[in-house]
Amino acid sequence: MKMENCKQWESHAEKKALAALLSRMEQGWIPALGKSVLIGHSDDFEGAVLLKDHVLEQFPDAEIAITDIGPIIGAHTSPGTLALFYWGDNR
């Protein structure tokens, strides 16, 4: 997925991270195992909604829920962390 014209993601690093998340999902997501997709965020609900929009654009069958990353994991990552969980075969 090309992210050059995506105005929501400001930095090159954000665009690259988004492209990497979507690429890994494209390679490994198996909808037959489950269409449920979970987006976790650490104090970045807006980023999670943007990620949801991009996932739905590329994978319209995905059933997406957004949730907070808990305080234990959040303390070890940082605010702004986004995580994408799905049924698949890649690790």
Image (spheres, grey):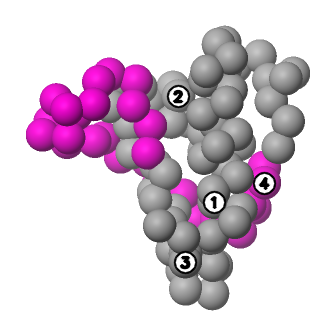
Identify the residue position indicated by label 4 in the image. Answer: 58
**Callout 2 amino acid:** Gly
Q: Are marks 4 and 2 in contact (CB under 8 Å)?
A: no
Q: Is residue 30 above or below residue 25?
A: below
**Which circle, 3 or 2, is nearer the viewer?**
3
Identify the residue position indicated by label 3 in the image. Answer: 89
Q: Answer with mark 3 or mark 4, whichever residue precedes in sequence.
A: 4
Q: Answer with mark 3 or mark 1, whichever residue precedes in sequence.
A: 1
Q: Is residue 75 above or below residue 56?
A: above
**Callout 3 amino acid:** Asp
Q: Are marks 4 and 1 in contact (CB under 8 Å)?
A: yes
Please indicate, yes or no, whether residue 35 appears anywhere in the rendered image. no
Label 3 packing within 10 angstroms: few (<14), some (14-19), many (20+):
few
Q: Which residues are magenta?
A: 57-83
Examine the structure image and report whether residue 59 is included in the region drawn in magenta: yes
Q: Answer with mark 1 or mark 2, whichever residue precedes in sequence.
A: 1
**Which circle, 3 or 4, is nearer the viewer?**
3
Identify the residue position indicated by label 2 in the image. Answer: 47
Distance from disc 3 to disc 4, alpha carbons, whole Å, reads: 18 Å
Task: Give the residue displayed 53% in from the left and 28% down from the top.
Answer: 47
Identify the residue position indicated by label 1 in the image. Answer: 25
Distance from disc 4 to disc 2, alpha carbons, whole Å, reads: 17 Å
**Callout 1 amino acid:** Met
Label 1 packing within 10 angstroms: few (<14), some (14-19), many (20+):
many
